[in-house]
Image: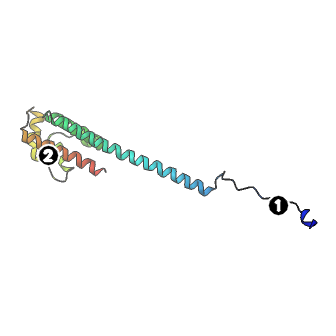
């Protein structure tokens, strides 16, 4: 019995530390942080596109209340310049502009109203109520198509 009392006590190793973290844990943390940042950037990008779409439609409704073809033309050109290269959009006018707008739509909506558009732009004539509503609907369809393609 005396032999058991003379033994030294067991020395346990220290508990493993949580710091520094093993390399595989750092990889998991880095992947989680990067994926979270990418997700936030994607949501912000989608929100900005949605914001621009809503803003374009709001501006269209404001222009629509005034029945001014030149203002509607400027709005469409401003939107086109933000989405397409300047060298493509800037030099176009008249029929070429209307054909290009129709080319970006699934079905032509601007060329059938060519006389209304050109008279409003170059002769400062106000369109009839029916023609104006068709111009607004064509513009709204173009804006919606533009933003749907980019979604």
In the rendered image, the residue lying farthest to the right is 2
**Residue lying at 27% horizontally and 42% vertically, measured from the top left:** 54
Tell me the residue that label 1 is attached to: 10
Tell me the residue that label 2 is attached to: 110
Q: Is residue 122 left or right of residue 92?
A: left
**Residue lying at 34% horizontally and 42% vertically, measured from the top left:** 48
Q: Is residue 117 above or below residue 30?
A: above
**In the depicted view, which residue is nearer to us: 78 or 63?**
63
- Identify the element where label 1 is drawn: loop
Q: Is residue 96 visible?
A: no
Q: Pinpoint residue 75: horizontal percent, then vertical percent.
A: 22, 37
**In the depicted view, which residue is nearer to us: 77 or 138?**
138
Q: Pinpoint residue 99: horizontal percent, then vertical percent.
A: 16, 47
How would you rate the neighbour count of disc 2 (Cα within 10 Å): few for under 14, some for 14-19, many for 20 or more? Answer: many
- Kindly indicate whether the residue at mark 1 contacts the one at mark 2 (C-beta within 8 angstroms): no
Q: Is residue 86 above or below residue 3?
A: above
Q: Is residue 89 left or right of residue 120?
A: right
Q: Is residue 40 visible?
A: yes
- Identify the element where label 2 is drawn: loop
**Residue 130, picture quadrant:** top left
**Residue lying at 85% horizontally and 60% vertically, measured from the top left:** 9
Q: Pinpoint residue 1: horizontal percent, then vertical percent.
A: 92, 68
Q: Pinpoint residue 66: horizontal percent, then vertical percent.
A: 14, 33
Q: Nearer the viewer, mark 2 or mark 1?
A: 1
Number of marks: 2
How would you rate the neighbour count of disc 1 (Cα within 10 Å): few for under 14, some for 14-19, many for 20 or more? Answer: few
Marks 2 and 1, how far apart at CA: 91 Å
């Amino acid at each position: 019995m005396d032999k058991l009392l003379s033994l030294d006590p067991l020395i346990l190793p220290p508990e493993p530390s949580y710091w520094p973290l093993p390399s595989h844990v750092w990889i998991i943390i880095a992947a989680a942080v990067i994926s979270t940042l990418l997700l936030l950037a994607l949501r912000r990008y989608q929100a900005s596109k949605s914001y621009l779409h809503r803003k374009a439609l709001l501006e269209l409704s404001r222009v629509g209340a005034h029945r001014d073809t030149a203002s509607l033309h400027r709005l469409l050109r401003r939107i086109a310049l933000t989405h397409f290269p300047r060298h493509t959009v800037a030099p176009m006018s008249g029929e070429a502009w209307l054909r290009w707008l129709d080319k970006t739509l699934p079905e032509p909506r601007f060329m059938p109203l060519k006389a209304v558009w050109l008279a409003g732009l170059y002769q400062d004539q106000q369109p009839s109520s029916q023609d104006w509503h068709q111009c607004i609907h064509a513009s709204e369809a173009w804006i919606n198509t533009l933003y749907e393609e980019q979604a």
